[in-house]
Image (cartoon, grey):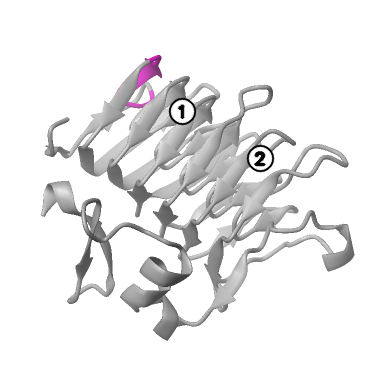
């Protein structure tokens, strides 16, 4: 992407890329309006089997099961990305602010990312601020859930909506807004550790130190701090 932005992307057939088997880097999609009548869709990429890094999306996506603000179905790695897009699943399960499902048997990784949009599953379960579903080989680390709200009939959580059966995903050092509206979390004793993340106040969320020291983000070469918005932005777009 070389730091380019695609403005006003509109699609009724899912994301900009149907499948990624290589690397998508330094591409922004701004004010997108994406719909998908099929499962597994994301604003940037529907199914990613490779690497996506230093990308961001804004706008909205709505569709059937497994919808994500950046990727619908992640078999690879999502690194140093963010989305402010609203995500809605209206005919199934699994909505995530960044990823619909972190795929099984893929060792998928989401790292150093954040999401701010509302995540909604209509009349069904599994909505997550970062990802809508995980497995024992899924990793989510050093991420921040800043979502406007998380809504589902059950399994609504700030970081990961749920993990398969009794499996435990690797959910490490993730932060989430303490006052984020989450309508249907599981009982605490029934949650996999890490589904909700470590609580941070709004003041902490608007502090660069929370990201640089708490999450270990690179503000020398990857991220910049937007003082007016009080949030990180990608340096390649500055």
What label does residue 133 carry, if any?
2
- Give the magenta range: 14-21
Residue 83 in view of the camera: yes
Q: Quadrant of residue 18?
A: top left
Residue at 69% x, 33% y: name it: 137
- Which image quadrant: the C terminus? bottom left
Q: Residue 54 versus residue 57: which sits nearer the camera?
A: 54
Q: Secondary structure at mark 2?
A: loop
Q: Position of residue 113 (x, y in %)?
A: 42, 51
Q: Secondary structure at mark 1?
A: strand
In this rendering, the answer to whether 225 lies above or below 178 is above
Residue 43 in view of the camera: no
Q: Position of residue 148 (x, y in %)?
A: 46, 66
Residue at 21% x, 34% y: name it: 9
Q: Is residue 60 left or right of residue 119?
A: left
Q: Is residue 100 left or right of residue 60?
A: right
- Which image quadrant: the N terminus? top left
In this rendering, the answer to whether 183 lies above or below 99 is below
Residue matched to label 1? 41
């Amino acid at each position: 992407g070389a730091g380019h932005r695609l403005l006003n992307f509109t699609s009724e057939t899912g994301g900009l890329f149907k499948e990624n088997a290589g690397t998508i880097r330094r591409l922004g999609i701004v004010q997108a309006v994406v719909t998908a009548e099929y499962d597994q869709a994301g604003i940037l990429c529907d199914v990613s089997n490779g690497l996506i890094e230093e990308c961001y999306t804004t706008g909205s996506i709505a569709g059937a099961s497994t919808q994500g603000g950046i990727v619908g179905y992640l078999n690879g790695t999502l690194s140093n990305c963010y989305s402010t897009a609203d995500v809605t699943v209206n005919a199934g399960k699994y909505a995530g602010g960044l990823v619909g499902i972190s795929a099984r048997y893929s060792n998928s990784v989401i790292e150093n990312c954040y999401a701010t949009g509302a995540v909604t599953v209509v009349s069904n379960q599994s909505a997550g601020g970062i990802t809508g579903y995980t497995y024992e080989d899924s990793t989510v680390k050093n991420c921040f859930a800043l979502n406007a709200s998380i809504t589902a009939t059950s399994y609504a959580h700030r970081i990961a909506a749920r993990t398969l059966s009794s499996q435990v995903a690797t959910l490490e050092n993730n932060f989430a807004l303490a006052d984020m509206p989450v309508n249907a979390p599981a009982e605490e004793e029934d949650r996999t550790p890490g589904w909700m993340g470590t609580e941070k106040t709004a003041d902490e969320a608007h502090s660069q130190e929370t990201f640089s020291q708490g999450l270990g983000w690179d503000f020398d070469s990857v991220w910049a701090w937007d003082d007016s918005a009080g949030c990180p932005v990608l340096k390649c777009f500055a």
